């Protein structure tokens, strides 16, 4: 069952946690979301929208449940799910998924057979799923990129500081599934 507007229309930190255990689906590629990071419009200097609207971050101000895709270091795409209230500029970064289906296609896109290295980082995830700047602003409510509910019990969620940041590094806005082989747990929520 694909998730609808009501799932995405919630506060950003809540969405970052709720996405854990759900499936990211794009065509034949499917992965279980195991790690996310929240980026907040207010009080979060690492958020691309914290300094206002620009051509680069315009998609962040769109409706919840759409994608914000950007290029980092001039070489890796990162995919975020727009969250919070429309016009505020918040998003949840998809940091890692556990590959489930379409693994051969993911391996081809990534140029590796190593499952642990396939989608264990935001740039790797975007490459494995074939996500590019052309997906910026795409809706997760229709089309070939969707989020699907997982038919299992709620995973145990851990939190830590976000990774690779200088601004806002002290904020514990990184969320992940405890004891998953793609991520590690620093403390239980």
Image (cartoon, helix red, strand yellow):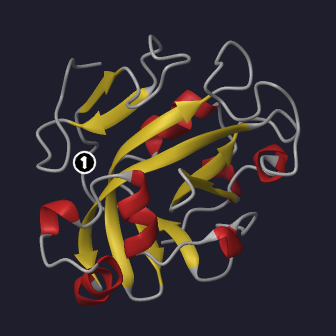
Q: Is residue 131 above or below residue 73?
A: below
Q: Is residue 165 above or below residue 121?
A: above
Q: Position of residue 82 (x, y in %)?
A: 68, 48
Q: Secondary structure at mark 1?
A: loop
Q: Is residue 96 above or below residue 114?
A: above
Horizontal relation, residue 30 to residue 133: left or right: left
Name the residue: 18% across, 28% down.
185
Answer with the quarter of the image where residue 112 lies.
bottom left
Q: Position of residue 171 (x, y in %)?
A: 47, 14
Name the residue: 59% across, 72% down.
132
Q: Is residue 85 visible?
A: yes
Horizontal relation, residue 72 to residue 182: left or right: right
Q: Position of residue 55 (x, y in %)?
A: 87, 51
Quick one: quadrant of the C terminus?
A: top left
Q: How many marks?
A: 1
Answer with the quarter of the image where residue 83 lies.
top right
Name the residue: 61% across, 33% down.
12
Residue at the disc numbered 1:
153
Q: Is residue 23 visible?
A: no
Q: Nearest the camera: 133 or 186?
A: 133
Q: Nearest the camera: 111 or 153?
A: 111
Q: Position of residue 54 (x, y in %)?
A: 87, 43
Horizontal relation, residue 29 to residue 10: left or right: left
Report crowding for label 1: few under 14, some 14 to 19, many 20 or more residues within 10 A (C-alpha).
few
């Amino acid at each position: 069952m694909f998730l609808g507007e009501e799932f995405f229309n919630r506060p950003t930190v809540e969405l970052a946690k709720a996405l854990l255990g759900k499936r990211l689906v794009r065509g034949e590629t499917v992965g279980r979301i195991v790690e996310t990071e929240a980026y907040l419009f207010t009080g979060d200097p690492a958020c691309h929208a914290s300094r206002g609207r620009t051509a680069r971050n315009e998609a962040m101000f769109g409706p919840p449940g759409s994608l914000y895709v950007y290029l980092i270091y001039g070489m890796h795409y990162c995919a975020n799910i727009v969250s919070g209230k429309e016009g505020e500029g918040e998003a949840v970064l998809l940091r890692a998924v556990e590959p489930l289906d379409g693994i051969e296609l993911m391996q081809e896109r990534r140029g590796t057979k190593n499952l642990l290295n396939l989608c264990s980082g935001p740039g790797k995830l975007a490459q494995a799923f074939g996500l590019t700047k052309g997906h910026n602003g795409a809706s997760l409510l229709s089309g070939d990129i969707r989020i699907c509910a997982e038919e299992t019990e709620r995973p145990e969620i851990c939190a830590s500081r976000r990774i690779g940041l200088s601004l806002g590094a002290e904020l514990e806005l990184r969320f992940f599934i405890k004891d998953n082989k793609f991520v590690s747990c620093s403390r239980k929520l």
